[in-house]
Amino acid sequence: MRPLIAGNWKMNNLRSEAATLVAGLMEQRAEQDPGCDMLVCPPFVSIRPVGDLIENSPIALGGQDCHSETAGAHTGDVSATMLADAGCEFVIVGHSERRANHHENDELIASKAKAAISNGLTVVVCVGETLEQRNAEKTLSIVENQVTNAVPDNATAKNTVVAYEPVWAIGTGLTPTIEQIAEVHDHICGLLTASFTDGEEFRLLYGGSMNPGNAREILAVENVNGGLVGGASLKVEDFWAICTSV
Ligand code: PEP
């Protein structure tokens, strides 16, 4: 399975910064196939400018969220239909920052994922436990609940990617041990295999403080099929180093 390295830019990069970043990535990618699929997810306003720049490159474009409906009175929201129309191939849903800051629950996330899939997008569904939940030894049950309820029933290995992102590892410089990552990824793989005919083929990404120093070890773990990268996706050399670590 070809790994996927996805850059979640969050609310970063003005147009000129975005242009410099993708120009650097495209330059590297033109010289070498890193052995993984590459995805960048800019903020909504940068999707078209970035899309224009990467148009003929193998780097894919994605959104960071979408609404579950196609159109309507939803001020400030963007639909999966609009993302597809703007040239996106992917969309992230259920990121812990959206769960925390916008009170998103698994039911809503599943409806967004369903809409994304119906619009031909590949959806990256994020799951992961808080530190409190890990300390209470609830990690596997929390993640199991999120996978069961947030991955929609029209998911297949082609249209859905699951990203395991421990909340306490996001943007903190902390990462789980290799054994902890392996345990959660094995569990997610087992859940998907039990629920979907092609469940074993879903790409499972690890996310949370991935950087050039730890990427190789994390990406070598069984059932880790790539990474969802925040901070380190904002620098050409760091993101590229992670891509070439697969
Ligand atoms: C993320 O927000 O998806 C993420 C993984 O962030 P970071 O790499 O900065 O921890």
Image (cartoon, grey):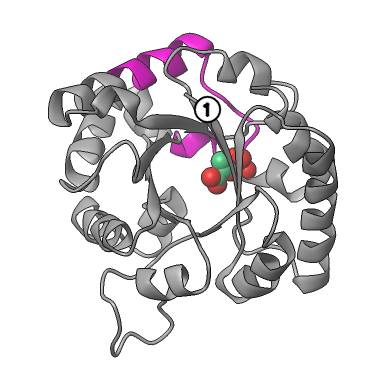
Question: Taking 21 as reference, is 194 left or right?
Answer: left
Q: Disc 1 residue type? A: Arg
Observer-nearest residue: 25 or 230? 25
Q: In x, y percent, where is residue 207?
A: 52, 35
Rendered position, 172 above or below 74: above
Q: In x, y percent, where is residue 111?
A: 22, 60
Residue 137 visible in this rendered orientation of the protein: no
Observer-nearest residue: 121 or 206? 121
Say which residue appears at 28% left-offset and 88% top-offset. Answer: 72
Rendered position, 136 above or below 126: above
The residue furthest front is 56
Q: Quadrant of ligand 1?
A: top right
Observer-nearest residue: 133 or 97? 97
Residue 185 visible in this rendered orientation of the protein: yes
Question: Taking 71 as reference, is 152 left or right?
Answer: left
Observer-nearest residue: 149 or 174? 149
User: Which quadrant would the C terminus be assigned to in this image?
Assistant: top right
The magenta segment is 166-187
Say which residue appears at 65% left-offset and 27% top-offset. Answer: 35
Quickly name the residue at label 1.
2
Q: How many marks?
A: 1
Say which residue appears at 69% left-offset and 66% top-offset. Answer: 50
Is ligand 1 closer than 8 angstroms to the Cβ of mark 1? Answer: no
The residue furthest top is 179
Q: In x, y percent, where is residue 135?
A: 37, 23
> Residue 216 falls in which quadrant of the image?
top right
